[in-house]
Amino acid sequence: MAEYAKPIPVPSIESKPYWEGLKQHRLLMQRCDDCGKFWFPPSLLCPHCTSDRFTWSQLSGNGKVFSYVVYHRVYHPGFATEVPYTVAVIELDEGPRMLSNVIGIAPDRVVCDMRVKIIYDDITESVTIPKFTPA
Ligand SMILES: [Zn+2]
């Protein structure tokens, strides 16, 4: 595997199960044991009902582009060969929104509400980044 030149995420105590799920190519998020809703980013209390009871549960990995921007400027040298690229807010079918990239399609063809599905980019032996591609 070639050396990875972009910043590598460092899991927090709250997000460790999320990153470990990605490593196994599973999208896991916290699901409230009381109200049943998912949430993201990880936190110790349900943002919907403030319960502290939750279960890490698998999501489908399917969703849609809620909003996006196209980066043309290189903000980090690790991205120098990738501009222009798409940074998008993905609204998952189960409700949560997450920031990611839409790949496998030219940035000028991405549109809001476009259906997307997750793909797992194994950037190192221990870290996997979730990205999305047209469904
Ligand atoms: Zn809740």
Image (cartoon, grey):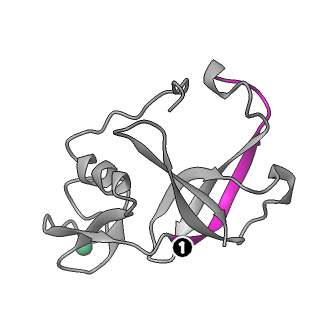
Badge 1 amino acid: Asn
Where is residue 68 shown, x and y percent of the image? Answer: 70, 53
Where, by quadrant of the figure, is residue 35 drawn? bottom left
Determine the image quadrant of residue 63. bottom right
Q: Tell me, yes or no, if residue 108 can be seen here.
A: yes
Relative depth, front residue between 51 and 124: 124
* 58 falls in the magenta region: no
Q: Which residue lies at the image location 25% right of the left edge and 46% below the top edge?
A: 16
Q: Position of residue 95 (x, y in %)?
A: 46, 73
Residue at 78% across, 57% down: 105
Q: In this image, 100 relative to 84: left or right?
A: left
Q: Quadrant of the C terminus?
A: bottom right
Residue position marked by numbered label 1 in the rendering? 62
Q: Residue at x 58, y 62 (%)?
A: 90
Q: Would residue 26 appear left or right of 95 to someone viewing this image? A: left
The magenta-colored residue range is: 62-76
Which residue, as the protein is rendered here, is positioned at the far right?
108
